[in-house]
Image (cartoon, rainbow, N blue to C red):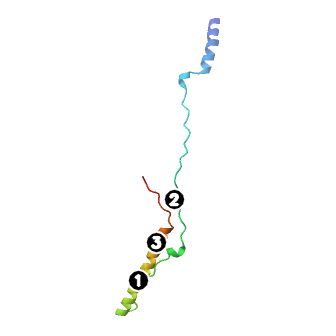
Amino acid sequence: MRIRHGLLILAVPFVLTGCPGDVRPQPQLPKTVYVEVDKFVPLDPTLLDDCPIAEPANRSVYEAVAVANARKLALQKCNADKAAIRAAQPAEPAHP
């Protein structure tokens, strides 16, 4: 009986310390990731206005020429607005 108690007393510290081969790996902490974010450039609201579309009032040649000239001016204004929008955008970096 004493031998059992002696073996039990010797075995308890080994049981309480655990097995060294049963070590769980430590969790990996997440790494910091930096992401580029697009920043939108505020635009002048007049650049976003609709372009007028000239319509003829009657079917005369004079009216057709006047409408064609008005449409050409409207197209030139719209192209100028688009050029101003492109100029407001930041330059894109060259991609490797």
Amino acid beneath label 3: Ala
Quadrant in the picture for the N terminus:
top right
Q: Residues within 10 Å of mark 1 (few under 14, many from 20)?
A: some
Position in image of residue 33 (x %, y %): 53, 47
**Residue 21 appears in the rendering:** yes
Q: Nearer the viewer, residue 49 or 91?
A: 91
Amino acid beneath label 1: Arg
Vertical placement of 64 versus 40: above or below? below
| Sequence order check, earlier mark of 1 and 2 | 2
Amino acid beneath label 2: Asp
Q: Residues within 10 Å of mark 3 (few under 14, many from 20)?
A: few
Q: CA distance from mark 2 to mark 3?
A: 20 Å
| Sequence order check, earlier mark of 2 and 3 | 2
Position in image of residue 20 (x %, y %): 56, 22
Mark 3 — residue? Answer: 83
Task: Report the residue at 62% width, 20% height from top.
Answer: 16
Vertical placement of 26 versus 12: above or below? below
| Sequence order check, earlier mark of 1 and 3 | 1
Q: CA distance from mark 1 to mark 2?
A: 36 Å
Mark 2, secondary structure of its residue: loop
Position in image of residue 56 (x %, y %): 39, 89
Mark 2 — residue? Answer: 38
Mark 1 — residue? Answer: 71
